[in-house]
Image (cartoon, rainbow, N blue to C red):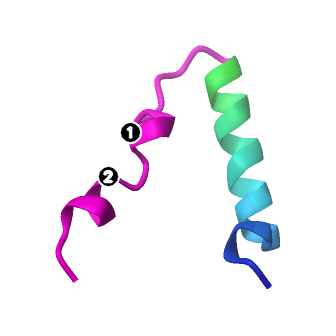
């Protein structure tokens, strides 16, 4: 199964949505969540 479809990922997404809705700042911003992986050579 795709890792992003695992139950724990759904729970994490929901938690982050709730935090964002409560006005909390989430780091890193969504578009940059894989930046560390993209910047690291294999």
**Image position of 33 with respect to 36: above or below:** above
Q: In this view, does 19 lie to the left or right of 6?
A: left
Residue 34 lies in quadrant: bottom left
Q: Is mark 1 on a helix, strand or loop?
A: loop
Relative to 2, is 21 above or below? above
Q: How many marks?
A: 2
Q: Mark 2 points at which residue?
A: 35
Mark on residue 37?
none
Q: Is mark 2 on a helix, strand or loop?
A: helix
In the displayed structure, 36 sits above or below 42; it is above
Which sits earlier in the primary sequence, circle 1 or circle 2? 1
Quadrant where the C terminus is found in the figure: bottom left
From this viewpoint, which residue is outermost toward the top?
Answer: 23
Secondary structure of the magenta portion, mostly?
A: loop
Judge left or right: residue 21 versus residue 5. Answer: left
Q: Name the residue under label 1.
A: 28
Foreground: 27 or 3? 3
* x, y percent for residue 3: 68, 76
Residue at the location (64% across, 39% down)? Answer: 16
> Counting other residues with Cα less than 10 Å from the Cα at mark 2, is it few (<14), some (14-19), or many (20 or more)?
few
Image position of 25 with respect to 33: above or below: above
The structure residue drawn at horizontal position 43% and vertical position 33%, both measured from the top left corner, is 29
Question: Where residue 5 appears, x then y in whole percent?
Answer: 79, 69
Q: Do the residues labelled 1 and 2 touch (CB within 8 Å)?
A: yes
**Which of the two residues, 8 or 36, is positioned nearer the viewer here?**
36
Look at discs 1 and 2 and give the one toward the viewer.
Answer: 2
Q: Quadrant of the N terminus?
A: bottom right
Is residue 17 a member of the stretch shown in magenta?
no
Q: Residue at x 82, y 70 (%)?
A: 7
Distance CA(mark 1)–CA(mark 2): 9 Å
Numbered range of the magenta stretch: 22-42
């Amino acid at each position: 199964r795709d890792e992003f479809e695992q139950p724990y990922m759904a729970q994490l997404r929901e938690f982050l949505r709730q935090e964002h809705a409560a006005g909390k700042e989430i780091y890193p911003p969504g578009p940059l969540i894989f930046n560390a992986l993209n910047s690291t050579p294999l």
